[in-house]
Image (spheres, grey):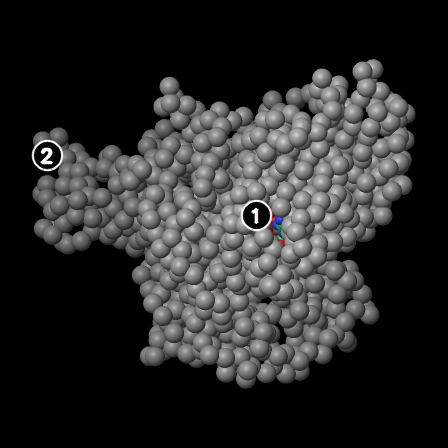
Amino acid sequence: MSHVEFIAPTKPEQAAAALLAGGAHARPLSGGTDLLVQLRSGRLPPGLIVDLKRIPEAIGIRQEGGGFVIGAATPGAALSEHRALGLAWPGVVEAANLIGSTQVQGRASMAGNLCNASPAADSVPALVAARATCVIVGPGGRRTAPVGSIAIGPGRTSLAPGEFVLEIHLPPRPARSGDAYLRLIPRTEMDIAVVGAGVNLTLDGDGVVTEAHVALGAVAPTVLLVADAGAALIGTKADEAALAALDAAARAACNPISDKRGTIEYRTKIAGVLARRAATIAYGRAEKRA
Amino acid sequence: MSKRQHISAVVNGDPVDFLTDPGATLLDALRDDLGLTGSKEGCGSGDCGACSVILDGRLVCSCLVLAVEAEGRRVETIEGMADGSKLHPLQQKFLEHAALQCGFCTPGLLVAAKALLDVNPDPTESEARYWLAGNLCRCTGYDKVIRAVMDAAAELRQVRV
Amino acid sequence: MSDVLERPAAAPLDDGQLKVVGTRPVRPDGAEKVTGKAMYGADLALPGQLVGKIKRSPHPHARIVSIDTRRARALPGVKAVVTAADFPDLASEEYEAGESASNLRDLSLNVMARDKALYDGHAVAAVAATSSAIADEALELITVEYEVLPHVTDVEASMASDAPVLHAHLFTQGLAEKPSAPSNIAKRNEIKRGDLEAGFAEADVVVEGRYTTAAVHQGYIEPHACVASFGADGQCQVWSSSQGQFMIRTYCAKILALESSDIRVTPAEIGGGFGGKTTVYLEPVALALSRQCGHPVKMVMTRDEVFRATGPTSGAVVEVKLGAKSDGTLIAADVVLKYQAGAFPGSPVGAGSMTALACYDIPNFSIVGYDVVTNTPKVAAYRAPGAPISAFGVESAVDDMALKLGMDPIALREKNAVRDGVKASYGPTYRNIGYVETLEAIKTHPHYAAPLGPNQGRGVAVGFWFNVGGESTAAVNLNEDGTAVVISGNPDIGGSRASMAMMAAEVLGLPVEKVRPIVADTASIGFSMLTGGSRTTFATGMAVTQAAQKVVEDLKRRAAMLMDVAVDEVEFVNGAAVCRDPAKASLTVAELAAKAAQTGGPIGAQVSLNAQGAGPGFGVHVCDVEVDPETGHVTVLRYTAAQDVGKAIHPSYVEGQVQGGVAQGVGWALNEEYIFDRSGRMENPGFLDYRVPVASDLPMIDAVLVEVANPRHPFGAKGVGEVPIVPPLAAVANAVRGAIGRRLTDLPLSPPKIRAAIDAG
Ligand SMILES: Cc1cc2nc3c(=O)[nH]c(=O)nc-3n(C[C@H](O)[C@H](O)[C@H](O)COP(=O)(O)OP(=O)(O)OC[C@H]3O[C@@H](n4cnc5c(N)ncnc54)[C@H](O)[C@@H]3O)c2cc1C
Ligand code: FES
Ligand code: FES
């Protein structure tokens, strides 16, 4: 990795300016668990690295306006240590915590997971199902965008030159809400998802689903928010029939590829299975969360 | 070639200074600049854990940290684990349980296991296995490694009470 | 791998008397390894050392039209550039070293391609530079013009008559008539007994299957690494992590046309090998670079290079047909093995053939093996080379046979088990084997009777490995204070220093802490074959024991001198020379050592031998799995492995060998595989997608040590390191069959395959 330049600004605006000035090969650095691997393997050309971890807003978890603000470079391990976040968004936290090993958790961030734009990124389906947004800083100032709008294809984002994600916002949580994320990997740890499924739902007092969002990973070029799958749950108590409809809707939405990690056929089937199982877990959590 | 940068950090409690290429990893700096070759490179891509160190209290793969990121940070490596010539209970238990064969994974496993016991003094077998899933060992099948970790945890709990 | 030579040896010491052997002391090199001080291949830094790197072919099969290194040489900081032109063009010559023979020409061409690149990752040039970054840049500046050729990676595709031919000079050996055209089938071998047709005609039940295994890598965590320094006077030094410093010396000498006396190889600590470090990749290149520039050159592979250019073992096709009488007597077996050799001939199909039916006493059988070259990295030995593959086929078929016969799988194996006096399928007559005892150990183990839950299954499989002896040298030197040093020439890959020290301590009557073992360089100890074939504790242990015994004889002689009695008046008991005459005070080892000058000078002995009679080993494994019927994901719930180990010198390290072998076998069965894309490039050259088992994938592995002593070893030891990887492939597959009610025949048993099998109904 020769010809690498490195700076660690403390202000978001400095970072944006440096990224813009650095040109096409300038990169924000959060945990580096994708970036360093890609630089080393030669998949990314060397250039300017802008470390975000010394920007105070980019690190840590804050409760604001009933929701949560997560600094872009906050490592997964910090998410798992935050009790309130875990109670409100267990699915988001478990998704982020599935990324890599304990060591990777010491570094890897959700924003990095998002901006790396892998279709198999684990935290993204959970964030999309959670209707999370992100605050983006760029040379022109700040803007907010839904998490689901960041990745536009494998390895490609909608971020403009100089832009980076500063924060991820999780919305306020109504009572009787629950979320869950499941993925399929051949091992038990240390694998990239063959399929991932995030489900986020809210119940009324009778246990009927009033709102549901289902997002799938690794079954299309970007994470899919499957409206039909969510709709299959709404108005039900996530009973067998609803789950079957959900399963079918999830499968119908899949547009995967066959690669070294899985076949089209297998991925499609598993998307249904995982969506169903995640919905059951999310439903159970929602029932418990008064 | 980019200019080398001057880095000051604290490694195993001691202040250190070194010059590093901005593209070099913390593992490179530890091994090549500081002569601390106890951390091993098994993959260079975060997959094997042989390079595990504790950075500001968090377990990380030093192959996935840039050396320049260590500026002002605290790094703990295998070389700092024993108290002088007195082995850490984990090191002692690894020896007693024959938890190493070739020993290449051992520094990383020990550092990772120490990080575990620092946050969870009483892990279940399953917790220990998942915590250590980022440390590949090809020789032992993990059986004796896990036994050693559980035994060391028990001993450390004794010491604490 | 011959187990034919019968040599009566002293009866093993009676267990009751052993004080050190069979205990579990802390290993002598342990503290170094838990504190990070131990020096592995990449840990050495010499003053003025350069960084060496290799340029590799991106094509699986291509003619090298030209290599232009001028721009690389001109780059400031680049000190040496080599290509095949810097190595002698060797004649074809078979050379026996360790577990398998190598052809020196092939070996040299594998180290550096000459006319053709034969796999993705094949070395085509190398550079040495003052920094890693400069070396990388220099590699970029080397231009290689390739004429890309059609390639073939699959073993059966490579056997087809229209397959692209890798070597125009390769004509199949072992055929009745010399073939008229070259082919990728390097060799056909055959082992036969009885009348196969008559056997099947007599059979009441026949089962048949076609099984495939993927190429898998040894997966040692330490990448290959070395430092080499070529002196101005032609004397060279090499430090490297390998399974044999003498092997490195020999191969470097042959490949570079040097004399062995000019090369001194110092073994670094080795971070795992499993057979994969029984050959050279970097050392001759580092020497060639160093020769060109006069600086020491250090070379360390990346993980990507390890996967693409070293190891693996064969992907294979195994066809098995078994015939049995209705009472379970196996009466006929027909086995066909097709093993991938990689770019050059030399797959382990020979050993696969010899081991395939080694656990069974079958009157009529035929085993035919094919050694097939493919555009994939040249295979290297991997723990019991060849045996797990053929065992996967045979043990799956035996399991089906048990099912068809309605017999318990262990009972079926017991009924057909080889025993002492039976002529093994591969030739010799078995003696002192503990196979039946090992079957018994599993049959009576609580695991075998434990209840299973829904979606769970239990699988049994057995396995065999020859174990080898061979040439070893060891020395035992007594220090002036009565402590001792044991010097051997075998890298300690998994605790062998401990067992060497223990055997010497046992004979010398010393506590084990008073005996310090070292692994010496090639100039400091006599020749020893490499650490492989499960030979070290057996053969080198025999040399150590004999050297210690010589020291004891010498001590008795010296004691007699000091006591002024005849030598036969003196016995050696518990670390002291004791005279029959109680009036004479005994002399301890320490006392005798202190008086060495008076009795003839320093005390020590060296023994070189060619050990014969390594007892073959048998393993019986039982595995429980649970299959998620919706995802096809397999969880290994419980695993018990029994093995006849002869005598466990250090039981913890023997258990460790068994547990490690099982883990590798489970990985082979479930998740590990080389995946090639359509252009013949490896798609998963990293530990994220080449999935070795992680800690959370496995349960505890219960190793049951069965001790049926090997009378040809002083303490009864047999080799233990290889047997445990033989049964797991089939044990896991048989357990999956039990769980889902269908037989899967293609490894790895990844979730998509299992789910597809379940869906197929
Ligand atoms: C061993 C290992 C196992 C892994 N396992 C998994 C897994 O199980 N699941 C999974 O999803 N991933 C996995 N990954 C991939 C990786 O860890 C995750 O994608 C991680 O979340 C990336 O976060 P990071 O902070 O390390 O990102 P970085 O590496 O710092 O950045 C990733 C990319 O995003 C850009 N970027 C970073 N931060 C920002 C920002 N704030 N704004 C804009 N762009 C930014 C970077 O420039 C880079 O292109 C694994 C990686 C390794 C090494
Ligand atoms: S070397 Fe860092 S994880 Fe393997
Ligand atoms: S002891 Fe060899 S890799 Fe763990």
Q: Is residue A209 left or right of residue C706?
A: right
Residue at x 18%, y 35% (from the top left corner): C578
Badge 1 residue CB within 8 Å of ligand 1: yes
Task: Mark 2: give few (<14), some (14-19) or many (20+) Cα within 10 Å.
Answer: few
- According to the picture, the residue beneath numbered tag 1 turns out to be A31
What residue is rendered at 43% in x and 64% in y? B4
Q: SS for tag 1?
A: loop
Front-lying residue, C312 or C445: C312
Residue C350 appears in the figure: no
Q: Note whether A87 is above or below B5 in the view shown.
A: above
Mark 1, residues whose alpha carbon is within 10 Å: few (<14), some, or many (≥20)?
many
Query: Closest to the observer: C415 or C28?
Result: C28
Tag in front: 2 or 1: 1
Pick the front one: A101 or C432: A101
Could you say whether the residue bearing mark 2 is in a helix, strand or loop? loop
Residue type of the residue flagged with mark 2: Lys
Q: Amino acid at mark 1?
A: Gly
Give the number of the disc on residue A184: none
Q: x and y percent of residue C515 in the render?
A: 28, 43
Residue farthest toward the front in the current orientation of the protein: A140
Which residue shows up at 34% across the image and 79% down it?
C232
Q: Position of residue C177 (x, y in %)?
A: 75, 71
Instruction: State the residue position of label 2.
Output: C584
- Left or right of A20: which side holds B74? left
Residue at the limit of the structure toward the top, as seen here: A206
User: Do tag 2 and tag 1 residues touch (Cβ < 8 Å)?
Assistant: no
